[in-house]
Image (spheres, helix red, strand yellow):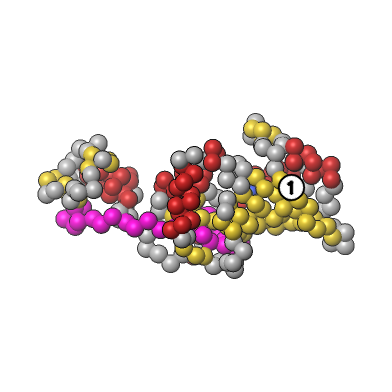
Amino acid sequence: MERLQKVIAASGITSRRKAEELIKDGKVKVNGKVITELGTKVNSNDRIEVNNKIIEKEQKEYYLLNKPRGVITSTSDDKNRKTVIELINTNSRIYPVGRLDYDTTGALLLTNDGDFANIIMHPSNNLEKVYLAKLEGIIKGEQINTLKNGIVLDNKKIKPSRVKLKKVDSNTNKSLVEITIHEGLNHQVKRMFESVGFHVEKLTRKQIGFFDIKDLKSGEYRRLTPKEIQKVYSYKDK
Ligand code: URA
């Protein structure tokens, strides 16, 4: 049994808040009877009508996007910037799972399945996120070790991260570093490098757990396979 407003919102026709208004306004029927009680529970056999139209269950959709720069990770933007949702060809009310900064590129999952999103985001599932960061300046072994040993951000001890120096270029004075983290704090990677004195010039997320963007060009996306979706759900039972 699920709450009526949740089922209406899950059908994709409107948000949960608007569904509540529709219920209060007497616009919703369950099995032919007008229901105005917000807490009403329904099951999958109940026939739900909104404004005299039967609602259909929205199919769950799952995407992996290689997010380009200059796109906001949100479902809408008050400054009218392009959102990641506009890059995906669907009418479903999908949303991004977690966030990448406006100028960060790479792996981003999108779905309309809240349970799936929670599994990906939940810290106890410990999903590894692999980033490639281009730094201004030449990073030294000592600074890499500081990051590897774990630092404190937002009063939170960040788990030791895997940090690999991929390249240094003394001509341009840049370093390329791969860093693997488990948390998803705001601007985490940029702040981690700032804490050891480096500005991140470019940041790409290569992987979230087993999802890897290596076959996707910037702005390209693909649907997840049933096997991948099942694999994520199997984390829940651990
Ligand atoms: N860390 C950051 O600093 N930015 C991102 O977009 C993701 C992780």
Residue 42 in the image, given as x and y percentages of width and height: 22, 43
The image shows residue 134, relative to residue 185, as above or below, that is below
Residue 28 in the image, given as x and y percentages of width and height: 19, 48
For residue 4, which quarter of the picture? top left
| Residue 18 seen anywhere in this rendered image of the structure | no
User: Which residue type does callout 1 highlight?
Assistant: Val
Q: Residues within 10 Å of mark 1 (few under 14, many from 20)?
A: many
| Residue 177 seen anywhere in this rendered image of the structure | yes
Q: Residue 67 lies in magenta, yes or no?
A: yes
The image shows residue 6, relative to residue 55, as above or below, that is above
- Identify residue for label 1: 163
Quadrant showing the N terminus: top left
- The verdict on label 1 being within 8 Å of ligand 1 is no
Q: Is residue 18 left or right of residue 132?
A: left
Q: Is residue 146 left or right of residue 11?
A: right
Magenta part, dominant SS: loop
Image: magenta residue range: 49-74
Residue extending farthest left: 32
Please report the residue visible at 84 percent of the width from the left and 42 percent of the height from the top. 142
Residue 201 in the image, given as x and y percentages of width and height: 72, 56
Q: Residue 216 lies in magenta, yes or no?
A: no
> Circle 1 — which element?
strand
Residue extending farthest right: 171
Please report the residue visible at 75 percent of the width from the left and 37 percent of the height from the top. 149
Please report the residue visible at 62 percent of the width from the left and 64 percent of the height from the top. 214
Residue 52 in the image, given as x and y percentages of width and height: 16, 55
Please report the residue visible at 23 percent of the width from the left and 39 percent of the height from the top. 41
